[in-house]
């Protein structure tokens, strides 16, 4: 998996109507102690362009390739994700542009954990949008 210094996302978010971003979550404690294997690998990345990743199932040899706008590693923090992909749509909201941040993944994959505030831990949207006044 590419580290934070690897160019695994374009320099700026694309202007396409829909952007697809993948964030690889940290292993859960039970996964870390059971020798779990990371099933996402970066195939290529073009600065300012698309990112191609490959998913390999642990119980299958089938590999799937996907083109994304950005790939965030386990080491990337919520602020980096927000600054790259969410903050760019906020100004448009005040000009009548619709914007949605949609989290998708399997049950237990960390969607709610990433999006919602958890006591003293910041989340993708909660900390950043609390100062917006409509």
Image (tube, helix red, strand yellow):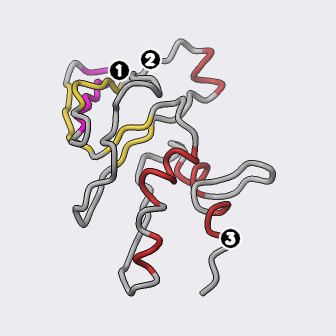
Instruction: Identify the secondary structure beneath mark 3.
Output: loop
Q: The C terminus is located in which quarter?
A: bottom right
Query: Magenta span has 53?
Result: yes
Q: Earlier in the sequence, mark 2 or mark 3?
A: 2
Q: Is 7 rendered above or below residue 88? A: above
Mark nearer the viewer, 1 or 2: 2
Magenta: main secondary structure equals strand
Q: Within 10 angstroms of label 1, few (less than 14), some, or many (20 or more) residues?
A: few
The residue that disc 2 covers is 37
Give the residue at x 66% y 25%.
29
Labels 1 & 2 near each other (Cβ < 8 A): yes
- Tell me which segment is drawn in magenta: 51-60
Give the residue at x 29% y 56%.
19
Labels 1 & 3 near each other (Cβ < 8 A): no
Instruction: Identify the secondary structure beneath mark 1.
Output: loop
Q: Position of residue 38 (x, y in %)?
A: 42, 21
The residue that disc 3 covers is 130
- Residue 58: image tag: 1
């Amino acid at each position: 998996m590419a580290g934070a210094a690897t160019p695994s996302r374009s320099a700026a978010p694309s202007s396409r109507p829909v952007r697809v971003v993948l964030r690889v979550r940290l292993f859960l404690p039970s996964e870390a102690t059971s020798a779990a294997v990371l099933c996402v690998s970066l195939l290529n990345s073009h600065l300012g362009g698309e990112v191609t990743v490959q998913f390999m199932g642990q119980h299958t040899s089938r590999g799937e390739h996907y083109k994304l706008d950005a790939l965030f590693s386990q080491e990337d923090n919520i602020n980096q994700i927000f600054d790259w992909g969410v903050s760019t749509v906020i100004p448009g909201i005040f000009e009548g542009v619709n914007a949605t941040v949609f989290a998708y993944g399997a049950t237990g994959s960390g969607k709610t954990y990433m999006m919602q505030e958890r006591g003293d831990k910041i989340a993708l949207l909660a900390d950043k949008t609390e100062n917006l006044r409509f």
